[in-house]
Amino acid sequence: MVSSGDTAPTFTATYNGSDHETFELDEHLGDGPVVLAFFPGAFTPPCSNEMVALQEHIGRIEDAGGTLFGISADSSFSLEAFADEYDLEFDLVSDMDSEATEAYDLSLDLPDLGLHGIANRAVFVIDEDGTVTYSWVADDPTNEPDYEDLVAAVDSA
């Protein structure tokens, strides 16, 4: 599992939005801290709560020079609808092929819900040099991170 002090694994995925452009993590490194917020699935209550909470903290993250990306295995079309539904002002990234989820060792199966290979809830802050400076992975995917700790980590990255 990726933890603080590790070099952040880079990956390629797809942005939400009408253009569904390619997202490459390494293109965002070097311009300030990058926050990767992995979540199991759009439109589920815990994930909706987390993304809304992150939206409420986006100003503080951006004031600290950070850029936030939400990442899930949902399609870019689903993520676009999700972002519109909750007025999210940060980009969501579709990891349908699980490249990011596997690179960060976050693969999760919830057989009772019929879900396999989704991302566990986790947040990573990556500094300009590509080093992970903050790592939080949920013991239970219904748990949310401590948002004040997250903002403080972006501030100090």
Image: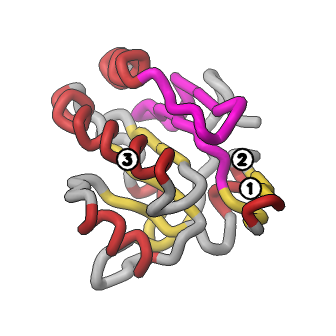
Quarter of the rendering occupied by the N terminus = top right
CA gap between label 1 and label 3 equals: 21 Å
- Could you say where residue 104 lies in the image, as x and y percent from the top left? 69, 46
* Residue where numbered disc 2 is placed: 106
Label 2 packing within 10 angstroms: few (<14), some (14-19), many (20+): many
- Could you say where residue 49 lies in the image, as x and y percent from the top left? 40, 43
- Give the residue displayed 32% in from the left and 59% down from the top: 91
* Magenta-highlighted residues: 119-146
* Residue where numbered disc 3 is placed: 51
* Residue where numbered disc 1 is placed: 102
Quarter of the rendering occupied by the C terminus = top left
Q: Are marks 2 and 1 in contact (CB under 8 Å)?
A: yes
Helix, strand or loop for disc 3? helix
- Give the residue displayed 47% in from the left and 51% down from the top: 45
- Could you say where residue 130 lies in the image, as x and y percent from the top left? 51, 37
Q: Is residue 146 left or right of residue 51?
A: right
* Sequence-first tag of 1 and 3: 3
> Nearer the observer, disc 2 or disc 1?
2
Q: Quadrant of residue 27?
A: bottom left
Q: Quadrant of residue 150?
A: top left
